[in-house]
Image (cartoon, rainbow, N blue to C red):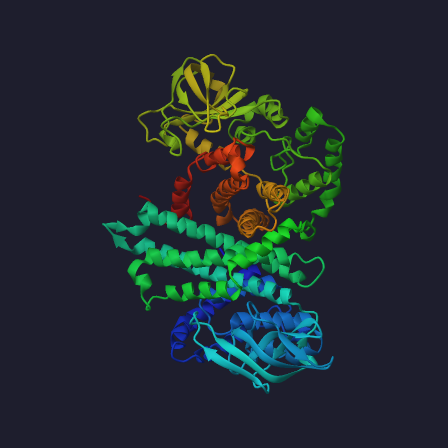
Amino acid sequence: MSIATTPDQTEIQNSIKSWAKSVDPVDTVRAQETDPDAWKALWPQLAELGLFGVAVAEEHGGAGAEIVDLACMLEEATARMAPGPVLSTALAGVLVSRAGGAVASALGETIAEGGLPVGVCLGYGVATLDGSGGAGSITVTGDPGVAYGGTTEGGILLPVESAGQVRWALLEGGTEGLTVTPATPYDLSASIGHVALDGVSIPADRILDGITTDDVRQLFVTLAAAEAAGVAGYTLATAVEYAKIREQFGRTIGSFQSIKHLAADMLCRTEQVRALAWDAAVAAEDLGTDSSELPVAAAVAGALAFDNAVTNSQDCIQILGGIGFTFEHDAHFYMRRAGALRQAVGGAARWRRSLAELTLAGTRRHLEIDLTEIDGLDARREEIRALVARVAAVDGAERKQALADTGLFMPHLPEPWGLGASPAEQLLIDEELEAAGVSRHNITIGGWAVPTILQAAPEHSDLLVRGTMAGEIKWCQLFSEPGAGSDLAALRATAEKVDGGWKINGQKVWTSLAREADWAMCLARTDPSAPKHKGITYFLVDMKSEGIRTRPLREITGEALFNEVYLEDLFVPDEFQVGQVNDGWKIARTTLANERVAMGGGSSLGDAAEEIVGLIRAAGAEDDALVLDELGKHVADGVVGNLLDLRTALRTLAGSGPGAESSVRKIVGVRHRQDIAEFGLELTGTGGVEFTEQGRKFLMVRCLSIAGGTEQVLLNVVGERILGLPRD
């Protein structure tokens, strides 16, 4: 797993991986402690791999690929700790190419071929230098600060103010009056230098016309986020590999729950950084245009990616233990890189504030998949549009029935219940429904019941499926018990075979909609002597049957949404036994796993974050620095959750199996919803001592990390099934 979403991008990363195995760049990084120029030995090879020219236009000597391809290369190069001014040189190549004109003609090909390593002065905390001169050239004297990637012989990209306008210039090493004094880098793989200018004359063909300070900083944070993804990926892989082999207390440390949770959290952060870096790189293709969404995509990346990379590097060393704290181990190089990147972009707080301000101003990232590039899809658009028009022409219960009858309600299902729609067709249908203003109604538990019936009990399809999809038949789920929550297979409700059916006895709990439901999916133990996952059978239960007693359960909000359900000699006819006897666990897992391909509709922030924006405006807190910092954090969390959904959909469209994103999504999504609910309560101020809607939500969201399996159990599952850590 990586930033890459295409076979070509994966191949590019594999070529860098193969190169690194042959030269071991970390040895060069170690050499740089005493020889700051050691990176130069590998520089021509990095240029040959295409790092500096991949996103430079062909007419300027590059490969003409996209910035996301460059991001994939930077991710892998960082994971292998490629040394030298790689990031800043790649940045300069893209900016020079985008500027075009004389500067691209003069320097584009040289940079693309690795002939001019470049450092960049981003200007954070340093006054922009004043320049004098006419349209032809600018003369500058002053100190622009530290150049990230600055070397004594390389070029320097820096801002200069002339005639009231900030312009970006690229000075070559050896320019008269330019001095770069090497400094000791925090990141030992990097080069930095203090830059001084004394009467430097900058000719017109060294000015990047049309490039703004925002362009430079936003593209820098985009490419730096790709490097942060490389750090996150390396530290995760290193920690997991070590946890699988290191033994303490007579067992490998990866079998300890505490280590699994650390590693699972590292995976969550890694997938977030990859998604953020990927999205910013995609947005960067429109750099400098009026339609560009790079400002918000870069701000989201800056707000979260670097903190995540730093925390991953810390947790990696924690899992490694003492060996991780030694200079001999490579882990500290990645911690240094993560920390240096965070400092270079000006710190995460700067980007959280920027993101908050953009959000309050109404700027949003629009996340969508371009379906026009998928072969054969346009041929179905008119047919689908006609079906949607039929649905849009009616309202209320008729619309619900029309959605079910046309197959648009669950289009991934086979005909006649759905349309047998491919993943791409499902997204096309969603697109057309949204355009027509048609929303699917929520059938809650019925959404799990329908595919289960079609797969495991098709003989009941006519009775139950259409009515469920139309919202006429409501469902509940009789799975959990007082002693079987996250450990569902520990259930104790029994089903005894009797003439014509089964007699079920037991207690179920945490059952939503039990009082309203017409039917239920039920698990009961049919063979108490079998292993706990083996002796379970699946049933469909008519909730109007005798032998069912329901008692509302009052939650911490004071409401009673859940129920206890007592099954007392409940008779279930044989025809409503689903599948084979004792095969219920497998069917239940199918029920819980049923998902269709979908993109979350609405705002890329998520509904909860949009509500928070309204609360901030209502409170007049738009200028409160603490509120802006919190808002930026929550917006970033909301956007990255939707990015994980988007990347999951892209993998499905490409025919790939599910990646880690879908497993990570619940963990990070639940945390986000709980955190933002708490922020909403905080915004009520002293008024929060009254019971308000925000207070109710703060209480209600506590169930999210419990329902459907607790977060701690899910972290164990991620550690074992995705990361391959040993079971207890």
Q: Quadrant of the C terminus?
A: top left
Residue found farthest to the left: 250
**Corner quadrant of residue 22:** bottom left
Residue 6 seen in this snapshot: no
State whether residue 194 is above or below residue 448. below
Residue found farthest to the bottom: 176
Residue found farthest to the front: 686
Residue 15 locus on image (x, y percent):
50, 67
Count every numbered label the image shows and give the total. Answer: 0
Most foreground residue, 75 or 711: 711
Most foreground residue, 417 or 651: 651
Residue 222 locus on image (x, y percent):
57, 62
Q: Is residue 157 left or right of residue 328?
A: right
Residue 260 seen in this snapshot: yes
Q: Is residue 82 left or right of residue 196?
A: left
Residue 615 locus on image (x, y percent):
60, 41
The residue sitting at 49% across, 81% down in the picture is 181
Most foreground residue, 496 or 43: 43
Q: Is residue 684 left or right of residue 523?
A: right
The residue sitting at 51% across, 52% down in the picture is 272
State whether residue 154 is above or below residue 127. below
Most foreground residue, 64 or 275: 275
State whether residue 589 is above or below residue 337. above
Residue 539 locus on image (x, y percent):
46, 23
**Corner quadrant of residue 504:** top left
Q: Is residue 329 left or right of residue 275?
A: left
State whether residue 589 is above or below residue 553. below
